[in-house]
Amino acid sequence: MEYINNKEKVEEFKKSQDFFVIIDFDRTLTTGASDASMGIIPKFLGGECLKERLRIYEYYRPMELDYTIEENKKKAIMKEWANNSFTLLSKYLTSEEIIENALKDANLHLRAGAKEFLKDMYDKNIPVVIMSAGVGNIIKRFLEKQEVLYDNITLVSNFFEFNDNGAYIDTEKIMAVSDKYYSRVPEDIRKVLDKKQNILLAGDIIEDINMIEKEKLHRTLTIGFLDYNVDTNLDIYNEKFDIVLAKGESFDTVRRILN
């Protein structure tokens, strides 16, 4: 189901080829039924790691989808979720080999049309920023395996570093879903992006709109994928996003709308 909430903005955007894309990964580029990148490693390792991951996920995920929670309170909750999740992974992620093995049978799938969309952007030399509060190491390797990590793509995410003691991540710098800000894009990339006339933004939660600054939203076409709590959240998604694609819509629909 598709909802076009700003037809004038869509028509104006279609006239321009001078834009860049900033897009979420989990359940935006991937299907709504895919596991989040944060869950791939615990699912592979099983045992206590998976048990604790599920406990954390089942506690915080409903709050991520709850837009009745006061904004600052929700930001703190989402930051807490990210810190707990990455602390857990740090205990069990001992080598990069685990990432490679975890991806072999992972429930991680690009949305229909996503591969073609990314190829379109590459062919047209349109910069793409993929911004994710998930595990950057998983995302990068997955995109490489899908052969879509083109050189016009900048991946901004949370990356583990590895040494003799295992995996390390600076918890002070972790990006949660509530603080995915444009300022996290490397400055040299931003200098290029800031010269573009328009912006295409896509995400699956309302906080993803924060990937671009408020003063740039008037020239940003926003697309929201809504696969969970559709009946509850459809009205607020239609209020916040220029286009809402609900119940398993694909990037084929994005490509058709944008012609």
Image (spheres, rainbow, N blue to C red):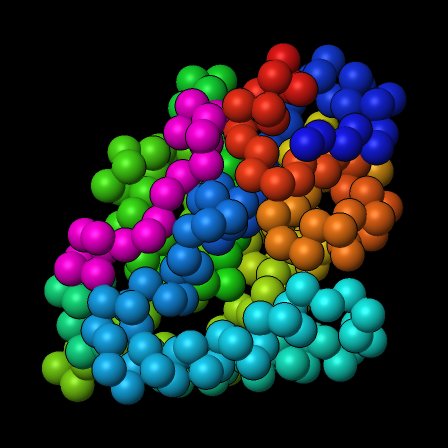
Residue ID at (24%, 41%): 145
- Residue 209 in the image, given as x and y percentages of width and height: 71, 51
- Residue 2 in the image, given as x and y percentages of width and height: 71, 30
Q: Is residue 157 left or right of residue 209?
A: left
Q: Residue furthest front?
A: 231
- Residue 238 in the image, given as x and y percentages of width and height: 81, 43
Between residue 164 and residue 57, name the one nearer to us: 57
Q: Is residue 234 left or right of residue 147?
A: right
Report which quarter residue 67 is drawn in.
bottom right
Total labels drawn: 0
Tell me which segment is drawn in magenta: 100-117
- Residue 102 in the image, given as x and y percentages of width and height: 21, 61
User: From the viewer's perspective, is residue 67 above or below residue 256?
Assistant: below
Report which quarter residue 160 is drawn in.
bottom left
Judge whether residue 223 can be spotted in this image.
no
User: Is residue 106 in the magenta section?
Assistant: yes
Between residue 176 and residue 46, name the one nearer to us: 46
User: From the viewer's perspective, is residue 25 above or below residue 173?
Assistant: above
Between residue 246 and residue 190, name the one nearer to us: 246
> Which quarter of the rendering shows the N terminus?
top right
Residue ID at (58%, 77%): 60
Q: Is residue 235 left or right of residue 55?
A: right
Q: Is residue 198 left or right of residue 228?
A: right
Residue ID at (28%, 37%): 146
Judge whether residue 72 can be spotted in this image.
yes
Report which quarter residue 249 is drawn in.
top right
> Which quarter of the rendering shows the C terminus?
top right
Residue ID at (48%, 81%): 56
User: From the viewer's perspective, is residue 24 above or below residue 171?
Assistant: above
User: From the viewer's perspective, is residue 176 above or below residue 147?
Assistant: below
User: Is residue 152 in the magenta section?
Assistant: no
